[in-house]
Amino acid sequence: MMEVIFNYKDFYTIIQPNIDDKMKDIINKFLIKIGKNENDKNLYYIYNGNKVNLELTCIKLANELDKIKNENNSKIK
């Protein structure tokens, strides 16, 4: 099972989405858990140093970053 872990104010919240859930839906579940509004413009979502594309599924987001890592590793060699 996949887990998405959010760090907000040094507290970790775990959401267990379906693989095909879009990040915007996963984030909305997180916001409900912490009692925040989805329109809060003061929150930013970063994964592995990159801004999260809210339209990607969590598995697609992870796969895209793995591709970037692999490209970077191949350039270093």
Image: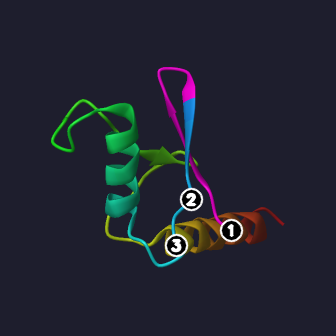
Q: Nearer the viewer, residue 65 or 2?
A: 2
For the residue carrying disc 3, how many other residues have a C-alpha within 10 Å: few (<14), some (14-19), or many (20+)? Answer: some
Q: Is residue 18 above or below residue 10?
A: below
- Residue labelled with disc 1: 1
Q: Is residue 61 above or below residue 29?
A: below
Secondary element at tag 2 = loop
Asked if labels 3 and 1 touch by Cβ distance under 8 angstroms, the answer is: no
User: Which amino acid, by three-letter code, is at mark 3?
Assistant: Asn
Quadrant of the drawing holding the C terminus? bottom right
Closer to the chain start, of discs 2 and 1, is: 1
- Residue labelled with disc 3: 18
Quadrant of the drawing holding the N terminus? bottom right
- Location of residue 50 in the rendering, given as x and y in whole percent from the top left corner: 47, 50
Q: Residue at x 37, y 51 (%)?
A: 29
Asked if labels 1 and 2 touch by Cβ distance under 8 angstroms, the answer is: yes
Q: Residue at x 19, y 35 (%)?
A: 40
Here the colouring is: rainbow
Q: Nearer the viewer, residue 16 or 67?
A: 16
Q: Nearer the viewer, residue 10 or 60?
A: 10
Residue 24 left/right relative to 70: left
- Location of residue 51 in the rendering, given as x and y in whole percent from the top left corner: 40, 50
On the question of residue 6 being in view, the answer is: yes
- Residue labelled with disc 2: 16
Does 2 lie within the magenta span? yes
| Residue interval drawn in magenta | 1-11
For the residue carrying disc 2, how many other residues have a C-alpha within 10 Å: few (<14), some (14-19), or many (20+)? Answer: few
Secondary element at tag 3 = loop
Disc 1 from disc 3: Cα separation: 8 Å
Q: In which quadrant of the rendered view does residue 14 lie?
A: top right
